[in-house]
Image (cartoon, helix red, strand yellow):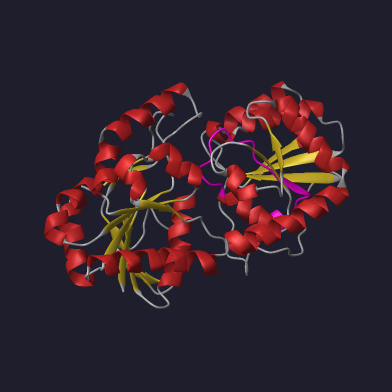
């Protein structure tokens, strides 16, 4: 089967969607012809072979400095129609899988549907925004009543990354032509390994947070929670983003800067080093306000690192009963769960082992990839 994935950005750009396409595509490429079409970002080549995938990077205008209610960067490809038609002519895909719907270039494919006669799948990684902020929620709702609605309506089949994403984003006919397939994790890479993380920080207990530094991740409340944690403990926050400087100032203003360490601001680790990072922590904490799925949780769970999360979005579907929960925007409640993790090593061990088992059952890429590929095959079979 010839498969074409389309997304504004792709590896080595680091994001949850980009990692998903990379992990899915390289597995599909073992038995199929797989092409990735994306934006040309930085000094990347226009075409390259990667893990058996044909990667096409189109000349694009990449907008980075956008207002905070928009998730930068954003890509626009002026000659998209000409470039994508040439790639389709060369690769002759049996199915085109669009990722997300916040891309004006996708309108071209929708307009060309009758000409191309190729099924268009849409994978929803970011559902309708709910609970981030009034401005972001309103903007997302407006888009889904206009451009997003057009893309969803004209997609032949839809894959949602969680039941919650499916529920809040789709209705009517779009819901009937959809299914839920969870994101995957590579259990051969993400597993308990020896780590020197705790040796690098002067604390008896260390938690880890891996996240973009943006308001929706709820890191403000993690910093505030540190006021109520009296143990010899340090919260390690790995990531970068526009909220970084503000979070550091907040830690100083609250006099908790010695209880938190910001790292990962200068670059990204590869997967094997990330597994060491997760494995070295006593527990993982991410008090999100909005989380469609929660790839960072599955990464921690696969490394037998117990988690603290919020009951928002797809997080309960991911954690199940293998983690602790705190109320969103509630630093005191978050501190209670942190203290509980610190004080109960047996609980940490029990939750960590259960988390690894849950990950192997529900989120192993070796089970997820066949589900996605078979979804294509079922649709193609029905069309014949």
Q: Do we see residue 230 in this rendering?
A: yes
**What residue is at 23 percent from the left and 65 percent from the top?**
383
Q: Residue furthest left?
A: 115
In the rendered image, the vertical position of residue 37 relative to residue 292, given as above or below? below
- In this image, 287 relative to 10: left or right? right
Q: Position of residue 318 (x, y in %)?
A: 60, 49
Q: Quadrant of residue 299?
A: bottom right
- What is the x, y in percent for residue 259? 78, 35
Q: Using the rendered view, name the quadrant where residue 273 is placed.
A: bottom right
Span of residues in magenta? 276-294
Is residue 81 rendered magenta in the image?
no
Screen quadrant of the C terminus: bottom left
Residue plotted at (41% across, 36% down): 128
Left or right: where does residue 205 sit relative to residue 82?
A: right
Whether residue 197 is visible:
no
Decide which of 173, 199 is in the foreground and name it: 173
Q: Is residue 71 above or below residue 177?
A: above
Quadrant for residue 98, please give it: bottom left
96 or 376: which is nearer to us?
A: 376
Left or right of 175 on screen, residue 248? right
Q: Position of residue 83 (x, y in %)?
A: 19, 58
Question: Is 282 inside the magenta-drawn segment?
Answer: yes
Q: Residue at x 26, y 68 (%)?
A: 94
Residue drawn at (67%, 55%), measured in percent from left and top? Answer: 301
Point out the image quarter for the N terminus. bottom left
Give residue 242's position: percent from left, percent from top. 51, 34
How many numbered dots are placed on residues in this image?
0
């Amino acid at each position: 089967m010839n498969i074409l994935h389309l997304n504004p950005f792709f590896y080595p750009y680091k994001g949850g969607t980009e990692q998903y396409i990379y992990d899915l595509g390289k597995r599909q490429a073992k038995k199929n012809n797989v092409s990735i079409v994306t934006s040309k970002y930085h000094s990347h080549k226009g075409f390259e072979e990667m893990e058996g995938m044909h990667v096409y990077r189109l000349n694009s205008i990449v907008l980075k400095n956008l207002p905070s209610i928009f998730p930068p960067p954003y890509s626009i490809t002026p000659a998209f129609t000409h470039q994508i038609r040439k790639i389709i002519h060369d690769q002759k895909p049996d199915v085109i899988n669009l990722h997300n719907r916040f891309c004006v270039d996708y309108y071209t494919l929708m307009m060309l549907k009758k000409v191309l006669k190729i099924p268009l799948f849409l994978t929803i990684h970011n559902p309708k925004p709910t609970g981030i902020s009034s401005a972001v929620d309103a903007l997302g709702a407006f888009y889904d009543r206009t451009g997003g609605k057009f893309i969803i309506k004209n997609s032949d089949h839809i894959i949602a990354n969680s039941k919650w994403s499916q529920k809040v984003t789709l209705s009517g006919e779009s819901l009937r032509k959809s299914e839920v397939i969870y994101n995957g994790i590579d259990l051969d890479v993400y597993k308990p390994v020896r780590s020197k993380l705790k040796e690098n920080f002067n604390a008896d207990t260390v938690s880890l947070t891996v996240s973009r530094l943006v308001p929706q991740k709820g890191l403000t409340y993690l910093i505030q929670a540190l006021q109520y944690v009296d143990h010899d403990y340090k919260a390690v926050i790995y990531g970068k983003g526009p909220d970084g400087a503000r979070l550091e100032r907040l830690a100083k203003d609250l006099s908790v800067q010695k209880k938190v360490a910001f790292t990962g601001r200068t670059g990204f680790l590869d997967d094997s080093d990330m597994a060491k990072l997760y494995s070295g922590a006593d527990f993982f904490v991410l008090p999100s306000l909005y989380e469609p799925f929660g790839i960072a949780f599955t990464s921690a769970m696969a490394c037998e690192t117990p988690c603290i999360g919020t009951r928002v979005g797809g997080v309960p579907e991911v954690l199940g009963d293998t983690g602790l929960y705190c109320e969103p925007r509630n630093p005191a409640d978050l501190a209670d769960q942190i203290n509980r993790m610190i004080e109960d090593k047996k609980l940490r061990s029990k939750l960590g082992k259960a988390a690894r088992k849950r990950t192997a059952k529900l989120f192993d890429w070796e089970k997820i990839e066949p589900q996605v590929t078979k979804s294509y095959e079922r649709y193609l079979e029905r069309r014949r």
